[in-house]
């Protein structure tokens, strides 16, 4: 696995085409790190010129902003922008829809103007450019349901890229009763990931997992590290982890490519 | 003598003109109050593509595109909406007739007039059917979104009252036409043959055997009650959730153009953060110009919200599509986006009444939107998933109000839930929401 950093490339006088923004979950969370690595393997395979910020990366500030702490958000944002502008970053790809939304929509107003793409869109482009070839392989005919991350779908209107990738695996894509624009949240957004839910009848991730199980999937595909955690917990809660896997779209592709 | 004769001849016209003036006058007075209340809000960012705004308004409000996401309610609503808009052409005729003392002044249009009256009648029948379906949905089927806690009491009554008024207006319209039709058949004076009556001809037999005099009384009563009913309904709007029939248009026009996920950046914060990050800034430098009191961050009351958010509150017709899509509400949490909008409006009305009673200025009443109307528990239950924003058929954004109130709680009161304070502490110290060292951020690359 080849993971160049911006700093090392800069020292060699080089500039990658795209910055891979790993995000906090992708850097620290054991489950999410697997997604990060799967994506890097694909980038390596496709010979994409990329780099990461490594220790120079810091949280985009998304959870602080959604919790109402605009100060902390803007402190984070301006620090990150300074780093990225220092490296003259033009294009950013990220595996986290929260980072994606914040970088794409909320950084420009603070001086951070980049072309920001979510990894599902990026992978679809690689596919169209023939840089990766996807043969269904082990996923041929498997029932896969896709959970729309709120910050990818409803928040930014990206519904088709992940679905097209899943279909390219020759898998059977089955939709949940709430999907696309009406997709139900996994329960993690708005900084909920970091606190106990308010009192209620049920946890949101259980409700969503039940919707997913109704489609009788073999795999629940996600495109967000937080959704992934919530759905994985939901599947465990239903004691279905032996028969149903929760996988990121990048993991599906890396797996299908035997990377 | 001549004067008395003049008075008697024109009494109906004069009475009509007085009612019309009163009806429109009182409505205008309330509209002014409505505008004043909305202007209590702060400035809103409504820049951006005007063309897109017009497009949104014609698509979403005029074209009802978001209503049909739920096909049954959507179709029924389109019927009532079309009925309302088209039958209003008839109201124009009624007003002219009332003022001039004429009868069916548009009858000169001949075949086209017949077509118009015929279509109004068919629409009136369809509206009656839709209204009955709506009533059944609200009162018998007990759809979840109509029996939530915030719908108890007045909101439920309001919803039903609107249906009753619409039903009565349609029945009066058809009665008026049915008796008119009878009188036309009789060849009564003034009732020259005009219009076609595809629906009311079937009601007409109810009036068989009545004398011409009685028929005229019934016809006139229905005519008068119908127009008075319309004037009443117009004035009822301000006191009801039904304002959406007017405000849906400006509300969709001023609706958010940016991606749903994009939250506003607070400018006042940007200035302070820039100062903090600028090594050359002199922290003791006196603020040059007017030493304004630093603004309050976030919102604890309606005056802290912007005017578009207040317009949102008056536009809400309490359909509850937001609440039924809300993940927190679906899983039994207290949060209901509809309640956020209803509370905002109720508090705004309270502030408005306070101003009316105090000569136009607001006297602090020891209450606010936060805690007195919207609880912290509701605010912290939101996942910011935008389902409510997406669901609203008239571009209301409850999420923006929730965020503004969270901003107040966190930045003015440091009153975030303790776990969130932990998360923010980590973020501040380590650049991640968890207690990991920033220097370990690339460790994954070394792991197998």
Image (cartoon, grey):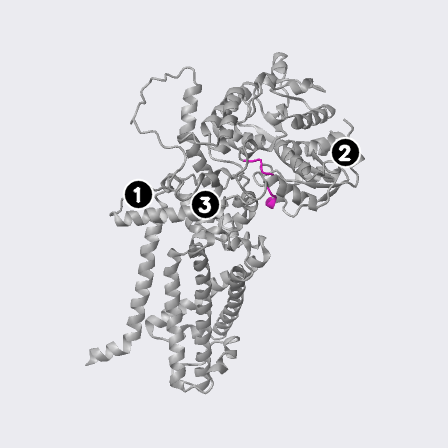
Q: How many discs appear?
A: 3
- In the image shown, does B180 or A59 lie closer to the viewer? A59
- In the image shown, does A188 or A16 lie closer to the viewer? A188
Q: Chain of mark 1?
A: B
As for residue B393 lying within the magenta part, the answer is: no
A177 left or right of A61? Answer: right
Provide the residue designation for mark 3.
Answer: B340
Q: Chain of mark 3?
A: B
Dot label at residue A134: 2
Picture coordinates of residue B390, whole percent (x, y): 54, 45
Q: Which residue shows up at 46% across the image and 30% down it?
A: A69
Q: Are marks 3 and 2 in contact (CB under 8 Å)?
A: no
- The magenta span reads A181-189
Q: Is residue B373 above or below residue B100?
A: above
- The residues tagged by marks 2 and 1 sit, at their Cα atoms, a distance apart of 66 Å
Q: Nearer the viewer, mark 3 or mark 1?
A: 1
As for residue A187 lying within the magenta part, the answer is: yes
* Sequence order check, earlier mark of 3 and 1: 3
Specify the quadrant that holds the C terminus of chain A: top right
Q: Are marks 2 and 1 in contact (CB under 8 Å)?
A: no
Provide the residue designation for mark 1.
Answer: B365
- The residues tagged by marks 3 and 1 sit, at their Cα atoms, a distance apart of 21 Å
B307 left or right of A82? Answer: left
Specify the quadrant that holds the N terminus of chain A: top right
Q: Which residue shows up at 64% across the image and 12% down it?
A: A12
Q: Nearer the viewer, mark 2 or mark 1?
A: 1
Picture coordinates of residue A66, whole percent (x, y): 50, 33
Looking at the rendered structure, the secondary structure element under dot 3 is helix
């Amino acid at each position: 696995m080849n993971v160049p950093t911006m700093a090392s490339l800069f020292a060699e006088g080089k500039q990658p085409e795209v910055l891979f923004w790993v995000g906090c979950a992708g850097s620290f969370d054991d489950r999410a790190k697997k997604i990060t690595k799967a994506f890097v393997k694909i980038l390596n395979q496709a010979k994409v010129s990329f780099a990461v910020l490594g220790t120079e990366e810091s949280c985009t500030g998304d959870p602080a902003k959604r919790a109402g702490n605009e100060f902390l958000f803007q402190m984070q944002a301006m620090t990150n922008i300074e780093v990225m502008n220092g490296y003259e970053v033009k294009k950013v790809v990220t595996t986290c829809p929260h980072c994606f939304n914040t970088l794409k929509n909320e950084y420009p107003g603070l001086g951070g103007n980049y072309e920001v793409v979510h990894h599902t869109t990026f992978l679809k482009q690689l596919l169209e450019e023939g840089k990766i070839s996807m043969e269904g392989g082990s996923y041929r005919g498997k029932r896969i349901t896709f959970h729309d991350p709120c910050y990818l779908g409803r928040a930014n209107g990206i519904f088709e890229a992940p679905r097209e990738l899943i279909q390219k695996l020759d898998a059977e894509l089955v939709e949940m009763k709430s999907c696309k624009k009406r997709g139900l949240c996994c329960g993690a957004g708005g900084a909920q990931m970091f606190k106990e839910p308010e009192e209620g009848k049920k946890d949101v991730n259980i409700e969503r997992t039940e919707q997913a199980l109704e489609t009788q999937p073999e795999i629940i595909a996600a495109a967000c590290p937080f959704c992934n955690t919530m759905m994985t917990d939901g599947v465990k809660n239903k004691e279905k982890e032996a028969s149903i896997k929760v996988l990121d779209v990048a993991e599906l592709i890396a797996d299908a490519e035997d990377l | 003598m001549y004067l008395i004769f003049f008075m008697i001849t024109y009494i109906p016209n004069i009475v009509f003109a007085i009612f019309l003036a009163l009806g429109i006058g009182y409505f205008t007075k309330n509209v002014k109050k409505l505008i004043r209340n909305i202007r209590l809000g702060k400035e809103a960012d409504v820049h951006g593509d005007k063309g897109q705004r017009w497009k949104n308004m014609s698509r979403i409000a005029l074209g009802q595109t978001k209503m049909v996401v739920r096909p049954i309610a959507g179709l029924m609503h389109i019927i009532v909406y079309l009925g309302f808009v088209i039958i209003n052409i008839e109201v124009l005729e009624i007003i002219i007739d009332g003022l001039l003392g004429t009868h069916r002044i548009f009858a000169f249009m001949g075949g086209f007039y017949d077509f118009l009256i015929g279509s109004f009648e068919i629409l009136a029948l369809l509206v009656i059917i839709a209204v009955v379906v709506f009533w059944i949905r609200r009162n018998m089927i007990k759809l979840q979104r109509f029996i939530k806690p915030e719908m108890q009491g007045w909101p439920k009554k309001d919803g039903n009252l609107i249906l009753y008024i619409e039903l009565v207006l349609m029945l009066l319209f058809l009665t008026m036409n049915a008796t008119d039709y009878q009188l036309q058949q009789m060849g009564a004076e003034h009732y020259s043959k005009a219009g076609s009556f595809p629906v009311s001809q079937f009601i007409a037999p109810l009036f068989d055997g009545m004398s011409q005099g009685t028929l005229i009384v019934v016809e006139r009563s229905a005519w008068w009650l119908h127009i008075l009913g319309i004037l009443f309904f117009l004035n009822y709007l301000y006191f009801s959730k039904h304002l959406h029939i007017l405000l849906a248009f400006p509300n969709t026009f001023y609706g958010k153009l940016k991606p749903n996920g994009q939250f506003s950046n607070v400018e006042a914060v940007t200035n302070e953060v820039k100062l903090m990050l600028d090594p050359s800034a002199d922290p003791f430098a006196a603020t040059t110009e007017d030493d304004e009191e630093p603004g309050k961050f976030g919102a604890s009351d309606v005056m802290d919200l912007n005017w578009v958010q207040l317009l949102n509150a008056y536009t809400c017709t309490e359909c509850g599509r937001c609440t039924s899509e809300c993940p927190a509400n679906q899983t039994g949490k207290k949060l209901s986006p509809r309640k956020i909008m209803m509370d905002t409006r109720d508090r705004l009305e309270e502030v408005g009444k306070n101003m009316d009673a105090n000569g136009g200025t607001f006297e602090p009443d020891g209450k606010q939107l936060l805690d007195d109307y919207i609880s912290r528990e509701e605010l912290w239950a939101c996942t910011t998933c935008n389902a409510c924003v997406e669901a609203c058929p008239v571009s209301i954004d409850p999420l923006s109000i929730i965020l503004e109130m969270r901003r107040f709680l966190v930045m003015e009161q440091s009153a975030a839930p303790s776990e969130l304070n932990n998360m923010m502490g980590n973020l501040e110290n380590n650049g991640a929401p968890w207690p990991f060292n920033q220097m370990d951020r690339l460790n994954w690359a070394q792991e197998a």
